[in-house]
Image: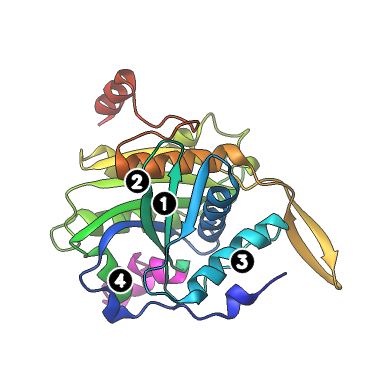
């Protein structure tokens, strides 16, 4: 497996974050939830699909940026899954893509470890010690950019929320609720509106246990569901996500997990959602995102 992308340090200079503008995607989730896999598959699909044209549109001319993204594509072509994001390292990637007869969309996404995200989640220990949970400083600085359009993907590890197995602790629910509260509150980021996509990763493991991804989140994320329904400032979409069939094989005496063909249907929904929420237009040949009148009526009735 090519590990060049793991040795290149492309960390964000915190001071360079000031006064940034443009479109930003934040992928949120616990440790090993599937954030890196989702981002890798997104870049891979945009690069390999003949309906889209992708550019590595780095803003500072650092070739390391392009090397990392290209390694994501090449490794997935060979079936290799991505490594976990390293704690303490923030990497920003800039890409541009267009669909047929559609203008290009430029956006940046931040590679963030689950350890750096979950510092905002209150714990028994933090309460006992009188500590106030606080989001990582660099991430918080990105979120406070006033000239940026922000979108959020909340990724849950569905394999840890089996419907008929041992109930999982509501760590993810607490994490999502804490971050949503921080984004909306007057003492936090004070966003007027949040466009979110809730993704149930590793969906193939639980797809026969839940009627839909919406039921999955309603059952396992009661506090998050309540927070979404309590305000009109959150525009929430839901999707299942699975990279494909993962098999183990032996290479050089080491057991390696590899994916046998990337599932297209899930990442196509992700691409559609991204393009639509940033531009207000649908991508030709991709799943439709725009809610119809009945969807909007049901959403209003649920609040």
Label 3 SS: helix
Mark nearer the N terminus (3 vs 4): 3
Q: Is residue 210 above or below residue 179?
A: above
Q: Which mark is residue 154?
A: 1
Q: CA distance from mark 2 to mark 3?
A: 28 Å
Residue 179 in picture, x, y percent from top left: 31, 58
Looking at the image, is mark 4 or mark 2 nearer the viewer?
A: 2
The residue at the point 34 percent across, 27 percent down is 291
* Disc 2: CA contacts within 10 A as few (<14), some (14-19) or many (>=20): many
Find residue 209 and report its image quarter: top right
Q: CA distance from mark 1 to mark 3?
A: 25 Å
Q: Is residue 41 above or below residue 126?
A: above
Looking at the image, is mark 2 or mark 3 nearer the viewer?
A: 3
Q: Return the residue nearer the eye: 265 or 137.
A: 265
Mark nearer the N terminus (4 vs 1): 4
Mark nearer the N terminus (1 vs 2): 1
**Residues shaded magenta:** 115-133
Magenta stretch encompasses residue 66: no
Please indicate, yes or no, whether residue 206 appears anywhere in the rendered image: no
Mark nearer the N terminus (4 vs 2): 4
The residue at the point 61 percent across, 66 percent down is 71
Q: Which mark is residue 84?
A: none
Q: Which residue is mark 2?
A: 196
Q: Which residue is mark 3?
A: 71
Q: Are marks 1 and 2 in contact (CB under 8 Å)?
A: yes
The residue at the point 58 percent across, 44 percent down is 49
Q: CA distance from mark 4 to mark 1?
A: 25 Å
Mark nearer the N terminus (1 vs 3): 3
């Amino acid at each position: 497996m090519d590990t060049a992308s793991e040795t290149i340090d492309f960390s964000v200079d915190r001071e360079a974050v000031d006064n940034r503008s443009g479109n930003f995607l934040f992928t949120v989730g616990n440790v090993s939830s599937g954030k890196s896999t989702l981002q890798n598959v997104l870049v891979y699909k945009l690069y390999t699909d003949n309906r889209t044209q992708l550019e590595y549109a780095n803003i500072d001319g650092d070739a390391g940026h392009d090397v990392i993204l290209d390694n994501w594509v090449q490794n997935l072509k060979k079936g290799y899954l991505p490594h976990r994001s390293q704690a303490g390292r923030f990497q920003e990637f800039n890409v541009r893509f267009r669909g047929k007869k559609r203008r290009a969309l430029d956006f940046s996404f931040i590679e963030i470890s689950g350890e750096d995200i979950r510092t905002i989640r209150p714990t028994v220990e933090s309460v006992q010690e009188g500590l106030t949970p606080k989001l990582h400083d660099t991430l918080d600085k990105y979120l406070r950019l006033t000239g940026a359009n922000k979108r959020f993907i909340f990724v849950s590890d569905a394999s840890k929320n089996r419907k008929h197995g041992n109930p999982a602790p509501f760590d993810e629910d607490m994490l999502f609720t804490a971050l949503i509260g921080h984004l909306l509150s007057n003492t936090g980021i004070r966003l007027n509106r949040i466009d979110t996509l809730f993704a149930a990763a590793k969906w193939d493991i639980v797809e026969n246990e839940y009627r839909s991804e919406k039921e999955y989140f309603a059952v396992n994320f009661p506090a998050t569901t309540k927070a979404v329904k309590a305000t009109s400032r959150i525009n929430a979409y839901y999707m299942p996500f699975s990279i494909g069939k993962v098999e183990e094989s032996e290479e050089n005496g080491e057991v390696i997990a590899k994916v046998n063909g990337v599932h297209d249907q899930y990442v196509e929904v992700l691409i559609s959602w991204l393009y639509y929420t940033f531009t207000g237009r649908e991508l030709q040949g991709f799943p439709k995102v725009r809610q119809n009148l009945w969807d909007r009526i049901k959403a209003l009735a649920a609040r």
